[in-house]
Amino acid sequence: MASDRKTTVVFDTYGGTGGPGEIVRAAARLSRQGVAQVVLVGEVVYLQDQLGLLPYDPMTLRLVPAPVAYPRRPGDTLAQAEAAELALPIAMEMLAEGEADALVTASPPELVRDLADRHLGRLPGCAAVAAAAVVPTMPRQGKDEPLGLLLDVSGRRTTDAESLVQFAVLGATYARVVTKTPQPSVALLSTGQGAHDGPPEVVAAHERLTSLASVRFVGNLRATDLSRGFADVVVTDGLVGHNVLGLLEGLTEMTVEAARYAWKTKVTWRLGLRLLAQGVGMLRKVSEFTTYGGAPLLGLDRLVLVANPDSKEAAFANAIKLAARCRAADLHGQLTTAMAPFATGGQP
């Protein structure tokens, strides 16, 4: 179990399209709430100037220097990536050495995964690491929020059934610990609902999961069923998951913008939207699914949360809270226990 000390969260402040400002504001606000100890890795003089404009608690927020300046041109993604490549290893080493309990970054996911492979270890028995993302779903009975978990969304091609089975175990454990769902339902994303639908690795994973006592497997889901909330956790190939997540983000943004346009343009449309106020309110809430603290890289022996590059203060603040919740619930211990049978060659 986790000790009574506060969770320490280290931030790579070089990621994100908005520069370090959003991270600094989130860290300053959370430092006053006493949620966690926050460490910002970055250009110290610049960070000090930013903090000088904000109320914060210096007892719970400290700065660690990185040997690179922030890009001076907003939106210079190449310069940001180059800076992150020098600064992110500092944060990774702090995490690896136990100086921090979690790392939050909005740097390019490919860079984060590559550096994690170099600086961090994996849970015993873990064949691959999965990025898990919160996705919007239709409201479900017994669920406080219309959200589900999708993994892998890393963009990496997953071609073996063993990895998909492990992703199911990791995702179910994460959902149980973080969302406090006693027995999360797990499904495979496939081309059809039948046991033999989909590519060979999905068919083989389906057979394995059907007999897996530790996972409440509910079968296959088609892409059209993903947002209907038929499962708490949906497992898929990393490339497919990455594209699905991008499509959801784009469609959600388009729908919200269409509602805004309707509100501003036509009086009759505005009246219609008022009649649909509850639904529009739910849409607005669902449209913020990218602010739910970032995508954890499940399978590592340390907690890494990859935030959306467009994250604002609220998202980074939620990442700090999520890290604290994960540690308080002993997520690492729960994941280690869940993966132990794979390390010994047994059946989980």
Image (tube, rainbow, N blue to C red):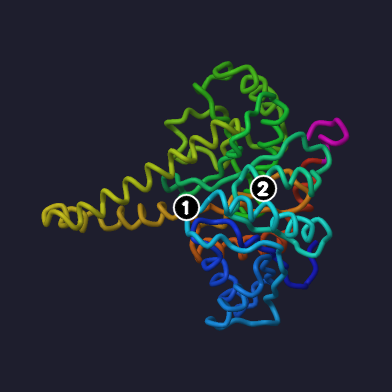
Q: Who is closer to the viewer here, 189 or 141?
A: 189
Q: Residues within 10 Å of mark 1 (few under 14, many from 20)?
A: many
**Label 1 to label 2: alpha-carbon separation:** 21 Å
Q: Examine the rendered structure and indicate whether residue 190 appears above or below residue 112.
A: above
Where is residue 250? Give x, y as percent.
Answer: 40, 43
Write the residue at 79% across / 43% down.
122
Q: Are marks 1 and 2 in contact (CB under 8 Å)?
A: no
Could you tell me the amino acid type at mark 2?
Val
- Location of the C terminus (image quadrant): top right
Residues packed near mark 2 inside 10 Å, few (<14), some (14 to 19) or many (20 plus): many
Front residue (pair 311, 299): 311
For residue 345: magenta? Answer: yes
- Regarding mark 2 in the picture, which secondary structure is present there? helix
Which of 309 and 201 lies nearest the eye of the viewer?
309
Q: Is residue 296 magenta?
A: no
Residue 65 spot, x, y in % from top left: 71, 68
Question: Which region shows up in magenta?
Answer: 340-348
Q: Is residue 89 left or right of residue 222?
A: right
Give me the residue at 11% from left, 53% from top: 268
328 horizontally vs 229: left or right? right
Q: Position of residue 343 (x, y in %)?
A: 85, 36
Q: Is residue 262 left or right of residue 135?
A: left
Circle 1 or circle 2, nearest the eye: 2
The picture places residue 176, in percent across and down from the top left corner, at: 65, 50
Label for residue 112? Answer: 2
Which residue is depicted at the point 67% across and 70% down? 38
* Residue drawn 62% across the image and 48% down it: 175
Name the secondary structure under disc 1.
Answer: helix
At label 1, which amino acid type do we have? Phe
Residue receiving disc 1: 289
